[in-house]
């Protein structure tokens, strides 16, 4: 799940960091990194992950003993992990030692991955996947997300892939004679109909840092009205959030708040409460990412039934240059490979991952990745299958509102989202506060 802001890293003892760097360098496979230690062992495949998330390690371990047993037999997995809060600092230290492992979870901050790539530290997967005979291993929309994060470069493998959109209660819409809306104007009319019938139209979280649930609506409105490169222009400084066309997105959300479409007190609602509100049938619409499938498919939590939940892409905006098939998405923390350690071992594992990771991740861990799934999984829940189909057919994707913001601007955006959703803060004031932090 990647709805949280990027973690801040803490400095740690350099001595321990260097020790880790040297240890990983000794495990590098098939490359010739320059270090002051003894020659690297070429029979192991070093992977560096996170203490907080063992899914990648588990999938790699399964591949090593299963689908890829023969092809990676000469390059056994040697997995290490570090705490996420300290992870980016460790990558910087390892890169300074020319000791990045064969495979690593990408950094919290996309900017650091861009720096590593600029320094020549990372493998370009567009070429590498073609070289190992798997040029179509990634879903186009997933590859689009990765390239959007890293200045157009395909330097990450999307071991997670989450799409976002509007989930809705089919029964509530049917009971109120509402056809599933596809445009912002149609949603506005549906909201008014529901509210008049005594039904809360939307469940949102606007409490503190959970306000990203609201800012997603602002960002997606902008993508639909101004096109998929709208926030890139803000990041480049050629446009500002205070420009009238951008303020229109925040104003549209604020107008819904003033009308009461988000309930009476969004600033008091956190993530868990918003989820529960939707899953207990107290709201018709809910904007959320596909990581929520676990909750939707959990019969203990979902009181409305998984069969009663539908999915809609974020709506089109009348006259806008964006399109509903540009799916809001994220790729978690993509996997990367060290260029210095890239050799036969890395190539063997890359081929293994390209051809088998998608199926193994989904069938064994229930995690949807950005890899094509080349085998049928018969027991997948219907909602999961629907999301898979959307992912496979989506031609491209867009990022989220704060994807290229500074940490300060991200905090301001998500903290001010609650008042925006209550309609007590205007779109202009919201955008001015965030733009002030962007400079």
Image (cartoon, helix red, strand yellow):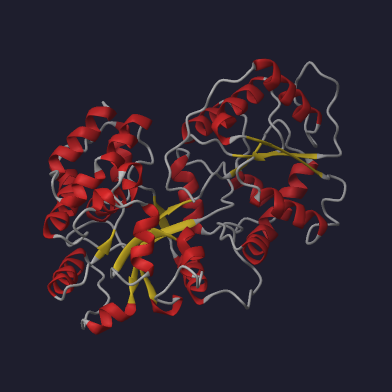
- Residue drawn at x 73%, y 33% is 341
Q: Is residue 405 left or right of residue 86?
A: left
**Residue 70 appears in which quarter of the rendering?**
bottom right
Residue 24 falls in image quadrant: top right
Position of 59 with respect to 137 (left or right) is right
> At 20% across and 33% down in the image, what residue appears?
433
**As rendered, which of 138 and 206 lies closer to the eye?**
206
For the residue pair 254 and 439, the one nearer the viewer reads as 254
Q: Is residue 254 left or right of residue 30?
A: left
If the image is split into quadrants, where does the C terminus sit? top left
39 in relation to 271, above or below:
above
Residue at image location 81% in from the left, 18% down from the top? 37
Q: Is residue 53 visible?
A: yes
Q: Position of residue 106 (x, y in %)?
A: 57, 39
Relative placement, left or right, of 141 versus 28 is: left
Is 54 above or below relative to 69?
Answer: above
Residue appearing at x 55%, y 35% in the figure: 107
Q: Position of residue 45 (x, y in %)?
A: 78, 41
From the viewer's perspective, is residue 201 above or below residue 204? below
| Residue 323 picture location, percent across and down | 30, 61
Q: Percent from the top left, x then y, of residue 262? A: 22, 59
Residue 303 found in image quarter: bottom left
């Amino acid at each position: 799940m990647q709805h949280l802001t990027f973690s801040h890293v803490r400095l740690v003892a350099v001595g321990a960091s260097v020790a880790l760097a040297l240890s990983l360098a000794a495990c590098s496979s098939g490359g010739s990194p320059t270090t002051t230690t003894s020659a690297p062992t070429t029979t192991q495949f070093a992977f560096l992950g996170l203490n907080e998330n063992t899914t990648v390690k588990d999938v790699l371990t399964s591949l090593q003993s299963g689908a890829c047993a023969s092809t990676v037999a000469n390059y056994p997995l040697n997995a290490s992990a570090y705490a996420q809060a300290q992870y980016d600092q460790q990558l910087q230290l390892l890169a300074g030692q020319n000791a990045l492992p064969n495979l690593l979870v990408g950094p919290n901050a996309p900017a650091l991955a861009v720096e590593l790539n600029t320094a020549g530290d990372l493998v370009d997967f567009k070429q590498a996947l073609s070289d190992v005979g798997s040029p179509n291993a990634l879903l186009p929309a997933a590859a689009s997300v990765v390239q959007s994060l890293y200045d157009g470069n395909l330097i990450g493998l999307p071991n997670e892939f989450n799409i976002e959109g509007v989930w809705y209660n089919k029964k509530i819409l049917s009971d109120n004679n509402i056809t599933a809306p596809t445009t912002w104007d149609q949603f506005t009319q549906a909201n008014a109909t529901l509210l008049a019938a005594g039904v809360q139209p939307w469940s949102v979280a606007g409490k503190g840092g959970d306000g990203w649930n609201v800012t997603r609506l602002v960002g997606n409105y902008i993508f639909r009205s101004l096109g998929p490169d709208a926030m890139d222009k803000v990041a480049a400084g050629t446009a500002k959030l205070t420009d009238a066309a951008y303020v229109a997105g925040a104003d549209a959300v604020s107008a819904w708040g003033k009308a009461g479409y988000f309930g009476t007190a969004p600033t008091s609602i956190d993530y868990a409460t918003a989820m529960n509100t939707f899953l207990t049938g107290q709201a018709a619409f809910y904007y959320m990412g596909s990581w929520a499938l676990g909750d939707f498919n959990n019969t203990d939590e979902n009181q409305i039934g998984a069969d009663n939940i539908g999915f809609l892409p974020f709506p089109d905006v009348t006259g806008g240059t964006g399109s509903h098939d540009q799916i809001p998405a994220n790729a978690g923390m993509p996997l990367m490979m060290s260029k210095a350690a890239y050799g036969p071992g890395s190539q063997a594992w890359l081929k293994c991952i390209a051809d088998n990771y998608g199926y193994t991740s989904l069938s064994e861990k229930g995690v949807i990745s950005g890899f094509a799934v080349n085998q049928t999984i018969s027991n997948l829940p219907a909602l999961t299958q629907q999301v898979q189909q959307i992912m496979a057919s989506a031609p491209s994707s867009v990022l989220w509102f704060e994807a290229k913001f500074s940490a300060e601007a991200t905090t301001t955006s998500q903290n001010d989202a609650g008042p925006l959703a209550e309609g007590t803060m205007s779109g202009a004031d919201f955008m001015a506060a965030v733009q002030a932090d962007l400079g």
